[in-house]
Image (spheres, rainbow, N blue to C red):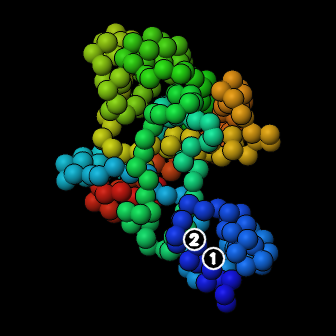
């Protein structure tokens, strides 16, 4: 009983403690040794579970309306229609692995409590900015850079060297999804898409939970964190990112893309507010 109480108090005091952390703290404080599995089991008995914290931004009524409208327009799309969409995004990977993989201890139905969410700061610290695109049955090469994305880099590298290859192979059916980040909406980017006749998919602002590639970034981060030995320098991290990007099973990526109808339904059910995705 005392062991469970200690674990509960310690986990609630620092919700980002890992099971290993809690086990070590318990051993240091009480000379009681328990395994990670015991920590999970004891905390589970009192209703605390290790879950990924929500990364979200505040949504206005306008944001919710646009998210809801988009979901209604795409809720009945077929797998064939979704197979023509390339989902893309950037993310940042740092040394050590950043808070993307952090788990927190929380009770059910407290997912969106403020203390159990993380505000997302994409840029900062030593690391790499990566861009990737996924499509049913395939993916782009992973683009890696140290500098912040600009409209010129986005046009000259992302569009010309990566997106254009898939558009050339698929033709008029191809749809390119990117979010509303400033470099993506630069005039030179719009002009490039128009000149290449690449159709851009409309996308509601602040909809990370709708984009399946966000889960791919989580997969990539978990694979990097699991490497033994882990990368300890930026060149090692770069090589690991390239290797693990290629090693993610394609069927896992395909399943994420094919989840789009369920994501749309979740948006509709939540009236455009944040969803469990």
Q: Is residue 67 left or right of residue 10?
A: left
Q: Are marks 2 and 1 in contact (CB under 8 Å)?
A: yes
| 123 vs 76: above or below | above
> Of residues 167 and 139, which is closer to you in this image?
139
Write down the quadrant of residue 196 in the picture: top left
Confirm whether residue 246 shows in the render: no
- The residue indicated by pointer 2 is 11
Q: Residues within 10 Å of mark 1 (few under 14, many from 20)?
A: many
Confirm whether residue 126 shows in the render: yes
Q: Residue at x 37, y 17 (%)?
A: 151
Q: Residue at x 54, y 21 (%)?
A: 145
| 42 vs 275: above or below | below
| SS state under label 1 | helix
Residue 16 position within the rendered picture, expressed as x and y whole percent measured from the top left: 56, 60
Q: Is residue 272 left or right of residue 77?
A: left
| SS state under label 2 | helix
Residue extending farthest left: 62
Disc on res. 274: none
Residue 265 position within the rendered picture, expressed as x and y whole percent measured from the top left: 38, 57
What distance separates the C-alpha of mark 2 from that of mark 1? 6 Å
Q: Residue at x 73, y 79 (%)?
A: 30
| 92 vs 141: above or below | below
Residue 86 position within the rendered picture, expressed as x and y whole percent measured from the top left: 48, 31
Disc on res. 7: 1
> Of residues 83 and 203, which is closer to you in this image?
203
Question: In the picture, which quadrant includes the N terminus?
Answer: bottom right
| 99 vs 161: above or below | below
Q: Residue at x 57, y 71 (%)?
A: 11
Write down the quadrant of residue 34 in the picture: bottom right
């Amino acid at each position: 009983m005392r062991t469970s109480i200690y674990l509960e108090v310690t986990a609630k005091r620092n919700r980002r403690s890992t099971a290993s952390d809690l086990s070590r703290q318990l051993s240091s404080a009480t000379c009681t040794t328990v395994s990670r599995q015991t920590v999970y089991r004891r905390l589970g008995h009192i209703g605390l579970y290790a879950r990924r914290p929500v990364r979200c931004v505040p949504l206005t009524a306008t944001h919710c309306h646009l998210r809801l409208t988009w979901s209604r327009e795409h809720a009945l799309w077929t797998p064939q229609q979704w197979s023509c969409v390339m989902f893309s995004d950037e993310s940042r990977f740092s040394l050590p692995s950043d808070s993307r993989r952090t788990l927190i201890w929380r009770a059910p139905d407290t997912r969106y409590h403020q203390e159990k969410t993380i505000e997302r700061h994409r840029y900062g610290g030593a690391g790499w900015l990566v861009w990737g695109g996924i499509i049913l049955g395939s993916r782009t090469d992973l683009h890696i850079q140290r500098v912040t994305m600009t409209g010129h880099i986005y046009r000259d590298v992302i569009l010309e060297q990566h997106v254009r290859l898939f558009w050339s192979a698929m033709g008029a059916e191809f749809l390119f999804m990117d979010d509303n980040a400033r470099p993506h909406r630069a005039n030179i980017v719009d002009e490039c898409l128009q000149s290449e006749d690449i159709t851009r998919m409309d996308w509601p602002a602040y909809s990370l939970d709708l984009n399946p590639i966000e889960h791919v970034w989580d997969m990539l981060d978990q694979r990097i964190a699991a490497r033994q030995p882990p990368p300890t320098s930026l060149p090692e991290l770069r090589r690991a990112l390239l290797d693990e990007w290629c090693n993610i099973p394609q069927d896992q990526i395909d399943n994420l893309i094919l989840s789009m109808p369920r994501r749309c339904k979740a948006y509709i059910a939540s009236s455009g507010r944040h969803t469990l995705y």
